């Protein structure tokens, strides 16, 4: 495993002038540079981006979701950016985002607004107006006659570009952005390290509040409060206990009352710092675990670290995925499953970044027949599970691929189940 050098590690969450922490200006510039390089490699003169994570990647804007088309961005080959947004957002961005000098008002041609409009003529008006505005920007930058990438394959949108003789390539754009985002910069890695540290604050809160007689929802609520207190965005996550730990409960956190002898599983997924998402879980025991629970935990931990030992630059996912359990180890018979693709989320590794799932994906469900190469700078979450006496354990580590293996970004103790004294 990769070891960081002296004085490297998580720093504070606030801005200071006496040491360099996450350099947000460098973060924006290096991401944009990567996007431009991939755009050129894919033969595109510009890209029109509708995906929130793609928009954030090239603009630095903290997109909050919504219709998916009341904000969109144009990136051109010379590095120019045009961003369209709602009136309130755009006016705010003009004031607060000086690194963007061309922010325009958006016409919401896709998503919630045209869906609510009620009439086909209204939907057509909104879509055509949106594409007219994009065409005008392409003309402003002299790229309207060159190949343009678009990161969504909406048939009506693509037809509108075709009507204007604008050559659009969705596959190249999606590939370009996926490739750019797969390798993380130093500041992106530090954002993921920071969110891991914040999640550990939530785990600590759980150890202090989980007691017999308290509800899952109350314990998780306290953990979420701690996440917000430490500066995170909380877009997901949950806590389950006892029989809700295996199989994983469909409703996530419930009002179940904790009891002595329960296993507790806490999943800090989709917690973010500067937009970078966590996927980090740990198992706790309300009182000393049984021998069967201890053995199940050891199996899950050993499986996880078998995979981690296989990850290095140049390794391919078809070989790495062999570290995950086979169908017997997946307990496929219990699920009445016959294929690995039926066992999504049980054992796999997935990329982390501005989205919960980015490249790479290491999974017996696809990797044997569709391998990809692991590269230095990729970040991912590796997760395993194992049933134990009608309950279950789950373990996950957040890692970054280094030149000679992986660096583990997550620090909560993993050798054994964390015991909470009831």
Image (spheres, rainbow, N blue to C red):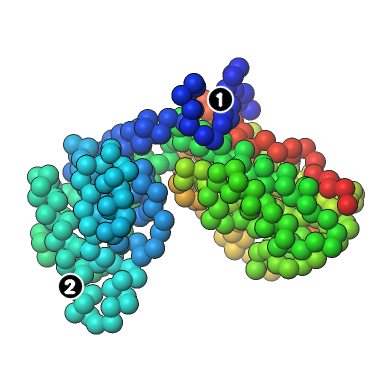
Residue 102, percent from left and from top? 20, 46
Identify whether 178 is placed above or below 87.
above
Residue 29 seen in the current view: yes
Which residue is painted at 22% across and 57% down in the image? 105
Residue 320, percent from left and from top? 58, 41
Identify whether 386 is placed above or below 44.
below
Left or right, 90 with reference to 182: left
Under circle 1, the secondary element is loop
Q: Nearer the viewer, residue 21 or 43?
A: 21
Q: On residue 184, which mark appears?
A: none
Asked where in the image residue 41 lies, by quadrant, the reply is: top left
Residue 309, percent from left and from top? 64, 33
Under circle 2, the secondary element is helix
Which residue is painted at 27% across and 59% down in the image? 87
State the separation of the CA atoms marked 1 and 2.
Answer: 55 Å
Name the residue at the top extreme: 6
Task: Tell me the crowding category of disc 1: few under 14, some 14 to 19, or many 20 or more residues within 10 angstroms, Cα based.
Answer: few
Q: Earlier in the sequence, mark 1 or mark 2?
A: 2
Residue placed under numbered mark 2 in the picture: 125
Residue placed under numbered mark 1 in the picture: 404
Residue 235, percent from left and from top? 53, 56
Which residue is painted at 82% across and 51% down in the image? 285
Identify whether 392 is placed above or below 278.
below
Q: Quadrant of the N terminus?
A: top right
Please give the count of numbered marks on the rendered protein: 2
Asked where in the image residue 167 lies, by quadrant, the reply is: bottom left
Left or right, 269 with reference to 178: right
Name the residue at the bottom extreme: 119
Which residue is painted at 17% across and 72% down in the image? 125
């Amino acid at each position: 495993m990769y070891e960081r050098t002296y004085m490297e590690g998580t720093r504070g969450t606030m801005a200071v002038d006496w040491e360099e922490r996450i350099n947000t200006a460098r973060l924006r510039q290096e991401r944009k540079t990567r996007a431009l390089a991939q755009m050129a490699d894919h033969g595109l003169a510009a890209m029109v981006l509708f995906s929130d994570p793609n928009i954030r990647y090239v603009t630095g804007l903290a997109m909050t979701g919504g219709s998916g088309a009341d904000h969109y961005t144009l990136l051109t080959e010379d590095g120019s950016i045009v961003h369209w947004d709602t009136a309130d957002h755009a006016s705010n961005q003009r004031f607060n985002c000086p690194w963007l000098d061309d922010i325009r008002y958006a016409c919401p041609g896709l998503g919630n607004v045209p869906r609510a409009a009620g009439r086909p003529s209204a939907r057509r008006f909104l879509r055509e107006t949106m594409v007219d505005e994009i065409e005008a920007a392409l003309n402003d930058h002299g790229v309207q006659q060159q190949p343009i990438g678009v990161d969504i394959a909406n048939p009506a949108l693509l037809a509108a570009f075709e009507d204007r003789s604008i050559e659009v390539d969705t596959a190249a754009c999606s590939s370009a952005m996926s490739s750019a985002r797969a390798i993380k910069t130093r500041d992106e890695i530090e954002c993921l390290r920071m969110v891991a540290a914040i999640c550990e604050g939530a785990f600590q809160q759980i150890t202090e509040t989980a007691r017999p007689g308290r509800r899952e929802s109350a314990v998780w609520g306290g953990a979420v409060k701690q996440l917000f207190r430490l500066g995170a965005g909380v877009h997901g996550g949950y806590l389950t206990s006892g029989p809700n730990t295996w199989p994983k409960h469909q409703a996530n956190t419930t009002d179940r009352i904790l009891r002595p002898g329960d296993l507790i599983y806490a999943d800090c997924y989709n917690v973010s710092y500067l937009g970078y998402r966590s996927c980090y879980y740990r198992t706790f025991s309300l009182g000393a675990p049984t021998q069967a629970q201890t053995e199940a935990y050891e199996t899950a931990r050993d499986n996880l670290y078998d995979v981690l030992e296989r990850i290095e630059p140049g390794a391919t996912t078809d070989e790495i995925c062999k570290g995950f359990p086979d169908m017997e180890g997946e307990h496929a018979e219990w699920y009445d499953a016959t294929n690995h693709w039926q066992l999504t989320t049980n054992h796999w590794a997935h990329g982390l970044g501005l989205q919960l799932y980015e490249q790479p994906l290491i999974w017996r469900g696809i990797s044997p027949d569709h391998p990809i190469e692991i590269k230095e700078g990729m970040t991912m979450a590796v997760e395993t599970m194992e049933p134990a006496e009608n309950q279950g354990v789950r373990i996950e580590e957040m890692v970054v691929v280094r030149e000679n293996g992986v660096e583990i970004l997550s620090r909560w103790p993993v050798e054994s189940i964390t015991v909470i004294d009831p």
